[in-house]
Image (cartoon, rainbow, N blue to C red):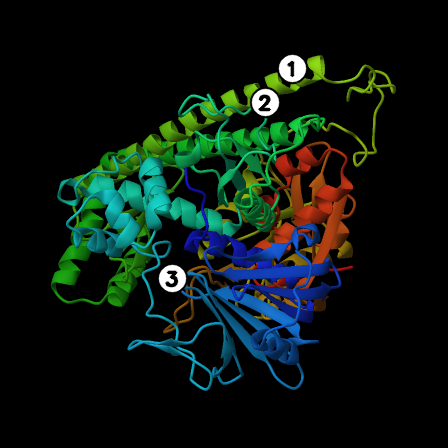
Amino acid sequence: MDPKRELSSIDLSALVTELGRYEGAKVDKAYLYDDDLLRLKLRDFDHGRVELMIEVGDVKRAHVADAEHVADAPGRPPNFAKMLRNRLSGADFAGVTQYEFDRILTFEFEREDENTTLVAELFGQGNVAALDETGEVVGSLSTVRLKSRTVAPGAQYEYPASRLNPLDVSLDAFVRHMDESDTDVVRTLATQLNLGGLYAEEVCSRAGVEKETPIDEADEGTYRALHGALEDIADRLRSGDIDPRVYEEPLDGAEDGAPDDSDAGSTDRPVVDVTPFPLSEREGLPSVGFDSFNAAVDEYFYRLARDDEGAGDAPADAAPSRPDFEEEIAKQERIIEQQRGAIEGFEAQAETERERAELVYAHYDLVDEVLSTVREARGNDVSWEEIEETLEAGAERGIPAAEAVVDVDGSAGTVTVELGEDGLAVELEADDGVEVNADRLYREAKRIEEKKAGAEEAIASTREELEAVKERKAAWEEGDAEPGTGDDDGDEAGDGEYEVDWLSRKSIPIRRPDDWYERFRWFHTSTGYLVIGGRNADQNEELVKKYMGKHDRFFHTQAHGGPVTLLKAAGPSESADPVDFAEETLREAAQFAVSYSSDWKDGRGAGDAYMVEPDQVSKTPESGEYIEKGSFVIRGDRTYFEDVPCRVAVGVQCEPVTRAIGGPPSAIEGRAAAHVTLEPGMYAQNDAAMMAYRTLKERFADQSFVRKVASADRLQEFLPPGGSELVE
């Protein structure tokens, strides 16, 4: 198998976020090797020495390299390197972006006297161009003069024509582009959708679609499955949910499709690929996992260069180092946990969709009346706004069909009704009848169950991998470990002794909670009361309608764009008495409301919030006025909290349950075994979550425990929307 020599668009998408973590590093010097490998040496306060490598020759890559992987500086610098030294020396690295879905990275550098942009073209012949503040080319490795674009000193830099981004394409656009092809599915994904061969095959495998299916034989189900697989990949990239892999050649004699992992991770093997997450198309190959995609890319290209030089053979008498079995076991267990969670999620989703379909039939007459009323109005050219007003008026008069309607979305042509004793929301296509809507819901349940079946197969495969790793560990320790050097140091404390030093414990038992409020934003105050907030307009509506008790307190920010925040006097099924909340409790709830509002997103250091009683909150506007979904009318006096700091803490709770938690620092400090505090800042939400995760993980001896209960994606759920940074 030929090794990969160029990073793909998907690879670059995963790398950009990680490269952005070096923002603020200062450039020391620029070097150029063999006219196609650019090295920028930088210094960073947090990371120390940073070596940024950009190669645009036969190998095309861009990443930060380990200092040990960097060759000695070349001799006399060529003119391009001299120009970069003049422009970049002492400049701050200000960020990196990927252009559209192309293999182009744009690096920004800022200096008091002049700013410089480096554009790395990691496709075709490859090129690096330096631009001034106006976008004019100052210098480039290669001069390009084409009818479509010019890259030459003195010319305005022109990006290539934009390509379709398959990770953002809607289902309708996806179908349209696929139908324009006259070949098979995999070739269309590779070319028309710009995925390239490997990821086109991966999408087919994840969707369960035969790769060579002719386009004229592909139906709606085929397209939905393929588009769903694309969305899953896009979601992983956006959320930073990666599990980087370097794939290696199997040992001689290994059966096809059955990887021999007896020395997976041995640096003697030739490498063949590097990916931001495991691919089913590579499952027949041994692989090595990494904590970051940048580290995986660096290791891959370092070994690729060594393989090309023929320097991969180790001395015959070299003693093998012990593989990191514990790390691999932890990774497999983490994957299993994620897969188990996905299965549970699919089961719940499918059950909910079936319940919705059954409720549509159970309330056939009511649903038919709603749909018929809307269709008749639309047939008479009545606007969606008027339809919504008419339904609201009907609800006030007690008309059951109108009372059931909770939302009208003219842009999507849908009406949402609440059905059944629990008021389950069901979105209906207004142009379709009862049967068609119910059938759509049944089909959606079936589609989700098919995803569940795929996840069950995946978890079975992962369990096999886990057992194989454990067997290899046992075989290694039996045959190679020296007596007395095992990892089992016993439990000298004895049975029953209560350990409170969670950070030092080598193994922390996981006790997962199952609390009703965890789908909302939430925290427990330092005095033990629950505070919950909405993540969106739908949840804001739900909190007020379903969960606000008469003795609770309602909080909101003065600034527009914030969550409904409830300080609960009791749980949803518990009776509550009036509560005289402590001032500390009220201020923590106010800080929660402020921190998750637009105050944080706009970078403000503090904001104002107010508190009212539940009976002051209404959904009924003044005559002639209109309130948006998720908004409410507040009547009467308010209690204000001024200049409340925008700060949150995220941490790891170890007792009485184990989980990630987040909220006002004063409430989290006493509940978390370890925590970090954040304030509005420059790092994107997923970057800040990764920084917090790494900081927390380093504090625990049982780092696998942190990965299982407080991974970066779980911590991200507690971070406010907008930029953040850790407070020292």
Q: Nearer the viewer, residue 647 or 309?
A: 309
Inspect this view and state whether residue 651 appears.
yes
Please tell me which residue lies in front, 366 or 210.
210
* Three-letter code, disc 1: Ala
Q: Nearer the viewer, mark 1 or mark 3?
A: 3
- Image point (70%, 45%), residue name: 651
Say if 488 sits above or below 444 in the image.
above
Which quarter of the rendering shows the C terminus?
bottom right
Mark 1 residue element: helix
Q: In the rendered structure, which disc, 2 or 1, sits on the residue that comes first in sequence?
A: 2
- Dot 3, how many residues are within 10 Å of its Cα: few (below 14), some (14-19), or many (20+)? few
Query: Residue 170 location, x and y as percent?
Result: 30, 55
Query: Can you give x and y, in whole percent of width and height, for residue 133 in the image?
Result: 53, 83
Residue beneath label 2, please? Answer: 469
Is the residue under label 1 in contact with that under label 2 (CB below 8 Å)?
no
Residue 540 seen: no
Question: Secondary structure under badge 3?
Answer: loop
In this figure, which residue is indicated by the disc labeled 1? 475
Nearer-N-terminus badge (1/3): 3
Specify the quadrant that holds the N terminus: top left
Position of 68 relative to 48 (above/below): above
The disc, 3 or 2, on the residue closer to the chain's N-terminal end is: 3
Q: Which of these two is toward me, 690 or 565?
A: 690
Discs 2/1, front = 1
Q: Which residue is mark 3?
A: 124
Instruction: Please state which amino acid type lies under the numbered disc 2.
Output: Val
Q: CA distance from mark 2 to mark 1?
A: 10 Å
